[in-house]
Image (cartoon, helix red, strand yellow):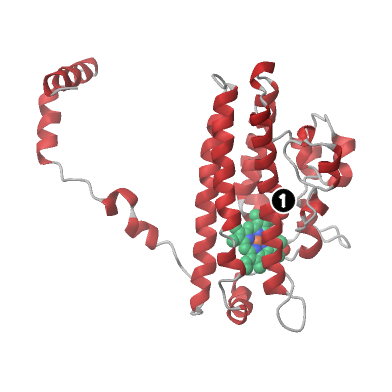
Amino acid sequence: MNKEELIIKLEEKYAAEGQPIEAYLEGLLHAKAINYWDYIQVDALFSLQKPRTNFPDEVIFLMYHQVTELLLKLVTHELEQATAEEGITGPILLEKITRAKRYTEVAQMSFDVMREGMDPEQYGQFRHTLTPASGFQSATFREIEFYCTDMWNLVMNRKKEELKGSGDQEEMFKWIYWQMAGVDHKTGKKSLTLRQFEEKYMKTFRKLANRYQKRNLWQQYLALPEAEKTSELMSMMKEFDHVFNVKWPLVHLRTAEHYLEHGKEVKAATGGSEWKKYLHPSYQRRMFFPELLTEQELENWGKD
Ligand code: HEM
């Protein structure tokens, strides 16, 4: 557009809003130029690291969790669009899932920052100041699950068949897989980690479960015309499922082993779970799109 065309467009824009264009042009005259640090909010970003000890490696632990939360936020940004009420086509779904997979892959591939990047002696000490907090309390992970799949896929493995197709959301929440990490099986009591998590997020989770029971990624896929359910789309959905529910959990588990099994005895997790069993993807068998998997893929799900 040349200068004259731009002025005409601007006049039209402000006239439609009942605003005099002169005031806006004058504003432009005085406005400061934008710069990188204000746009990116660098100072605000760097003010968000508040370690609880003086161990230098705690900052790595804290910042890498923040990095992961930002990556997961990018995933939800794509999934929110992919689960929009209208206008979703096969190619749009493919693009959104490809992006979601890419961000998850960055999280998985960069996990060595945790696995290899901290001194186990320091970790072994600063971790005590974090009890009973745990990555288990990351709601962003759980939100992604509601966006992606029907809720009974999130039910613990032994209850899955029984609740398959159930519309009873409360029953499914009762048996949702993460309860396995937060309930003492002897007393039946919930851990503080789980209670805090539920107090803060259950309302949000119920809303998400309601909103997405008919409009999650899997349902969006099913609603596509047959011609748009391409093999490319199917493979991308399977790859995303595998990175999110197998590859990331495995590298996370290996990291937990590296630190919690360092030294003479196996350490208890800050969130108090039976972590070695619980964190293994072949134990949880969490998957978003089981209908797309072959029998062999189902059988080998989560194995190293
Ligand atoms: C040294 C690094 C880490 C160790 C030793 C570790 C350890 C653990 C353990 C033992 C659990 C089980 C729950 C509990 O009892 O606390 C857990 C859960 C979890 N952690 Fe980590 N973690 C580490 C880093 C991270 C990072 C960087 C993230 C990214 C946000 C993260 C996210 C999660 C999530 C989402 C869960 C729940 C997994 C599930 O429910 O299947 N963790 N972690």
* x 83%, y 48%: residue: 300
**Viewer-side residue, 276 vs 269:** 276
- At mark 1, the secondary structure is helix
Q: Is mark 1 within 8 Å of ligand 1?
A: no
Q: Quadrant of ligand 1?
A: bottom right
Query: Can you give x and y, in whole percent of width and height, for residue 15 in the image?
Result: 19, 16
* Res 267 → quadrant: bottom right
Q: Nearer the viewer, residue 116 or 121?
A: 116
Residue 130's quadrant in the figure?
bottom right
Q: Residue at x 79, y 36 (%)?
A: 293
Q: Position of residue 212 (x, y in %)?
A: 65, 30
Q: Quadrant of residue 43?
A: bottom left
> Pointer 1: what residue?
246
Q: Is residue 126 left or right of residue 153?
A: left
Residue 48 in percent (x, y) is at 43, 61
Q: Is residue 198 above or below residue 279?
A: above
- Image quadrant in which the N terminus is located: top left
Relative to residue 216, is residue 173 drawn left or right?
right
Residue 206 in sight here: no
Taking the view exactly as shown, the residue that stands out farthest to the front is: 231
Q: Nearer the viewer, residue 193 or 136?
A: 136
